[in-house]
Image (tube, rainbow, N blue to C red):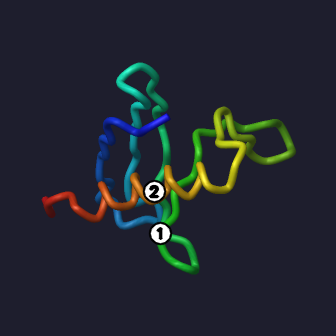
Amino acid sequence: MKITDVRVRRMTDGGKLKGVASITFDDEFVVHDIKIIEGEKGLFAAMPSRKAGDEGYRDIAHPIKTETRNYIQTEVLTAYENMPEE
């Protein structure tokens, strides 16, 4: 499975949320609402999630393997960092 497209929308409100991405796999399956967040250790990609009552948030879609998570994060952050400044 390969990521064939990454689209990023930059957020300019100055908060921790730096952008929102959509990725397409094999030109056939898309995942929206991957958040690009500025954390204590730098940028990271957070999978789409929703509020789960008092338990906080739960991922709606997420990779099972660490390698896949790293692949997605690398592709999303590379697309974000290569975006032209507005």
Q: Are marks 2 and 1 in contact (CB under 8 Å)?
A: yes
User: Which residue is rendered at x = 49% and y = 50% of the image?
Assistant: 72
Measured Cα–Cα span from mark 2 to mark 1: 7 Å
In this rendering, the answer to whether 74 lies above or below 57 is below
Q: Secondary structure at mark 1?
A: strand
Quarter assignment of residue 3: top left
Quarter of the C terminus within the rendering? bottom left
23 relative position to 80: left or right = right
Report x, y in % for residue 28: 41, 19
**Residue corresponding to mark 2:** 36
**Residue corresponding to mark 1:** 43
Q: Outermost residue, front direction?
A: 1
Residue nearest the observer in this picture, 65 or 58: 65
Q: Outermost residue, right direction?
A: 54
* Tag 2: amino acid: Ile
User: Which residue is rendered at x = 39% and y = 60% of the image?
Assistant: 77
